[in-house]
């Protein structure tokens, strides 16, 4: 996204990207590309000091989608998708608007000499660097050692927007989906409440509401006896046969579970490779309001490499895209003030 914007400035830039570019765009929204959300509220983001960047740039982002001819539609919850409902069409449009070649290389080393940057002992000099290397979410292994040379506070990455593991034996209802109210408790305190579809797994639970709960879980200071309380019924019925999935009904009857109070103890989240985003990364204290680093304002950081994470619904791509607009505007201002 930033590269398409830099094209407008007629400046020389180079993109280094390890592996397939845009792979998370392709994965988003189950391949349909949940590109953004019509709504904004800082409460949809954790560590939200810089969420104002999203608020300030949201309209510009939507206008820019139109300029790029990425035409969108939205659902009742404001989730935006391209009309094609194809992530590939979004990625193709972005790539079509980038004139430079993309160098498929992992950056492992950054050096600064005489106010210029050199990468991997091979590329440079560059006047500015933009760190947009995302997070380990969805990967089995991920190297972010290069960040360490920059003297930043880097918070450990933890999987977020991911399911929970439980030690309760729920294998018999594995694969069953249910609409429910879910409440996350920790240390007997209510942490977050949300209604929507849950999916029971062999050793855990998932679904959008559960993934959202995982993001609140990750921001707990101390984890103590966490559990999810599930209310399977929106009201009391005189019979549950047509209300609950038969497998689920049998399970709660055999185990003598109150359908309003189905407790799932949590032993952890699923691993990073199953996560959609990660909590962690560059601590916000390192960043100025324009996303440049406080210890070196020729370097910017944007997107998921920063320790800000949003809930499900297009909020994470919207964060990455709005950051791109912010960095673009800053560079543009600097050029026009020269
Ligand atoms: C399965 C899945 C589904 C998702 N669904 C949604 C959704 O529906 N809506 C939504 O808003 N968000 C969704 N997300 C999250 C969203 O895709 C990310 O938050 C967003 O892509 C982050 O953008 P980014 O540019 O910061 O990082 P990324 O998109 O991760 O891009 C970073 C790039 O940098 C490369 N890289 C990393 N390290 C280096 C290095 N050292 N040198 C060179 N290159 C490097 C990576 O290989 C990658 O190509 C989903 C994510 C996943 C995994």
Image (cartoon, rainbow, N blue to C red):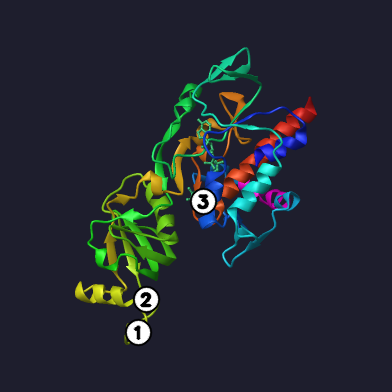
Residue 193: x %, y % from top left: 41, 62
Please tell me which of labels 3 and 2 falls first in the chain. Answer: 3
Q: Residue at x 34, y 50 (%)?
A: 269
Counting the numbered discs, the total is: 3
> Does dot 1 land on a helix, a strand or a loop?
loop
Q: Residue at x 39, y 65 (%)?
A: 198
| Residue highlighted by disc 3 | 27
Residue 167: x %, y % from top left: 23, 56
| Residue highlighted by disc 2 | 233
Which circle marks residue 237 in the picture?
A: 1
Residue 212 left/right relative to 72: left
Closest to the camera, between mark 3 and mark 2, is: 3
As measured in the structure, the alpha-carbon distance from the residue carrying label 1 to the one carrying label 3 is: 40 Å
Within 10 angstroms of label 2, few (less than 14), some, or many (20 or more) residues? Answer: some
Is 148 placed above or below 62 here?
above
Residue 316 in view in this figure: no
Within 10 angstroms of label 1, few (less than 14), some, or many (20 or more) residues? Answer: few
Evaluate if marks 3 and 2 touch, with contact meaning CB atoms under 8 Å apart: no
Residue nearest the viewer, comparing 126 with 230: 126
Q: Residue at x 71, y 39 (%)?
A: 5
Verify whether residue 58 appears in magenta.
yes
As measured in the structure, the alpha-carbon distance from the residue carrying label 3 to the one carrying label 2 is: 32 Å
Residue 94 left/right relative to 110: right
Is 158 placed above or below 336 here?
below
As measured in the structure, the alpha-carbon distance from the residue carrying label 2 to the one carrying label 1 is: 8 Å
Q: Is mark 3 within 8 Å of ligand 1?
A: yes
- Which quarter of the picture shows residue 333? top right
Residue 298 in view in this figure: yes
The residue segment tinted magenta is: 54-64
């Amino acid at each position: 996204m930033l590269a398409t914007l830099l094209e407008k400035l007629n400046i020389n830039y180079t993109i280094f990207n390890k592996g397939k570019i845009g792979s998370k765009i392709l994965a988003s929204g189950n391949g349909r590309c949940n590109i953004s959300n019509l709504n904004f509220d800082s409460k949809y983001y954790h560590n939200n000091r810089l969420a104002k960047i999203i608020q300030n740039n949201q309209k510009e982002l939507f206008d820019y989608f139109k300029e790029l001819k990425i035409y969108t539609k939205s659902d009742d919850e404001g989730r935006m998708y391209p009309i094609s409902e194809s992530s590939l069409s979004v990625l193709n449009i972005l790539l079509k608007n980038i004139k430079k070649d993309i160098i498929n290389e992992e950056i492992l080393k950054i050096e600064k000499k005489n106010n210029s940057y050199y990468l991997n002992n091979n590329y440079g000099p560059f006047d500015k660097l933009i760190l947009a290397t995302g997070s380990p979410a969805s990967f089995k292994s991920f190297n972010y050692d290069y960040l360490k040379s920059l003297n930043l506070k880097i918070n450990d990455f933890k999987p977020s927007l991911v399911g929970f593991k439980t030690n309760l034996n729920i294998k018999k209802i594995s694969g069953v989906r249910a609409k429910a109210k879910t409440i996350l408790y920790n240390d007997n305190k209510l942490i977050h409440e949300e209604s929507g579809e849950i999916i029971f797994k062999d050793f855990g639970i998932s679904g959008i509401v559960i993934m959202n709960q995982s993001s609140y879980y990750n921001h707990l200071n101390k984890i103590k006896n966490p559990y999810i309380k599930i209310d399977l019924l929106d009201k009391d019925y005189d019979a549950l046969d047509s209300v609950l999935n038969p497998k689920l009904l049998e399970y709660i009857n055999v185990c003598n579970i109150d359908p309003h109070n189905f407790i799932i103890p949590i032993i952890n989240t699923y691993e990073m490779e199953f996560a959609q985003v990660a909590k962690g990364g560059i601590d916000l204290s390192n960043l100025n309001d324009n996303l440049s680093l406080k210890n070196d304002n020729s370097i910017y950081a944007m997107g998921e490499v920063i320790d800000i994470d949003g809930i499900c619904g297009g909020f994470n791509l919207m964060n990455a895209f709005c950051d791109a607009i912010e960095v673009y505007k800053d560079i543009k201002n600097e050029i026009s003030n020269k």
